[in-house]
Amino acid sequence: MLATVGAASLVVAFGFAGAARGATYKWVDEKGVVHYTDKIPTEAASKGSTVLDKQARPVKRIDPALTPEQRRARAVEEEQKRAAAKAQEEVARRDRALVSSYTNEAEIDLARRRALATIDAQIESSYSYAARLDKRKAELDKRREALGDKPVPHALESELAGNRIEIAKTTQLIEQKQKERAATVARYDADKVRWRELKAVTEANAVSASAQAAAAGTAPVRVAPASANGGSRM
């Protein structure tokens, strides 16, 4: 049953009638007319409504159905919130690992030197290998030039091709290791800065806790050393 009520007195009357029918809904149509019914018509289901109790008091709000655009916007917003929460948790995880891994800045510097030593050794080895490749290339080029107009043997041509490939791969490896080195330096520098920030926060919290304990009268009592005559001073 649908009923349109225009007067406040009918709202009260409908409240008594609602006791027999159960839930009561308040909704507004396209013309702005307020309706009180025992169920929501299909054409009004997407407009939102208010559930009333037996005394015609609002107990629940049913929001209007979202449009496709609103659903897409909400989905994007929820995804952004999830991404932000994930990023925040990752920061917290890194902070915990940083605090548990180092007790002072010297340990961070030592870890950086060790990491860079490994990378520097790889770069040095690659440079040495590249030098040998360049030397071999010069020898192969000299042999090919010595042939003049004669056909280049397949073995020589094959070795020259392989040499060029190895030089290109080694050059690329050196570039990657140099980038890795720069990233390692930046990471440890950032770790040191963040460690200092976390250390400062920890110390500030400790001072604050100590001050609160002192204000509460739970701070340890300092006893002055005994005087020369056997007495004591507080």
Image (spheres, rainbow, N blue to C red):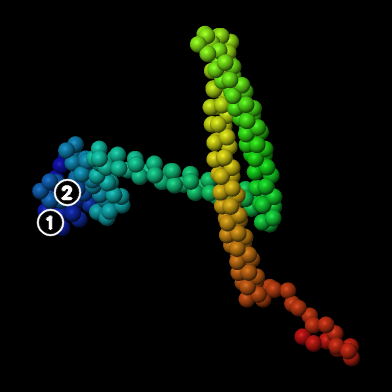
Residue 75, x across and y down, in percent: 34, 40
Look at 60% across and 27% down and name the residue there: 134
Is residue 105 toward the left or the right of residue 142 in the image? right
The label on residue 152 is none
Residue 198, x across and y down, in percent: 59, 58
SS for callout 1 = loop
Is residue 208 toward the left or the right of residue 61 in the image? right
Q: Amino acid at mark 1?
A: Ala
Look at 58% across and 20% down and name the residue there: 142
Tell me if I can see residue 50 in this picture. yes
Number of residues whose C-alpha sits closer than 10 Å to that of mark 2, classed few (under 14), some (14–19) or many (20 or more): some
Looking at this view, is 54 or 39 the one in front?
A: 39
Residue 231, x across and y down, in percent: 86, 88
Number of residues whose C-alpha sits closer than 10 Å to that of mark 1, classed few (under 14), some (14–19) or many (20 or more): few
Tell me if I can see residue 162 in this picture. no
SS for callout 2 = strand
Which callout, 1 or 2, points to the residue nearer the camera? 2
Residue denoted by label 2: 28
Look at 56% across and 45% down and name the residue there: 182
The quadrant the N terminus occupies is top left
Residue 130, x across and y down, in percent: 61, 30
Residue denoted by label 1: 7
Distance (Cα) linking label 1 and label 2: 14 Å
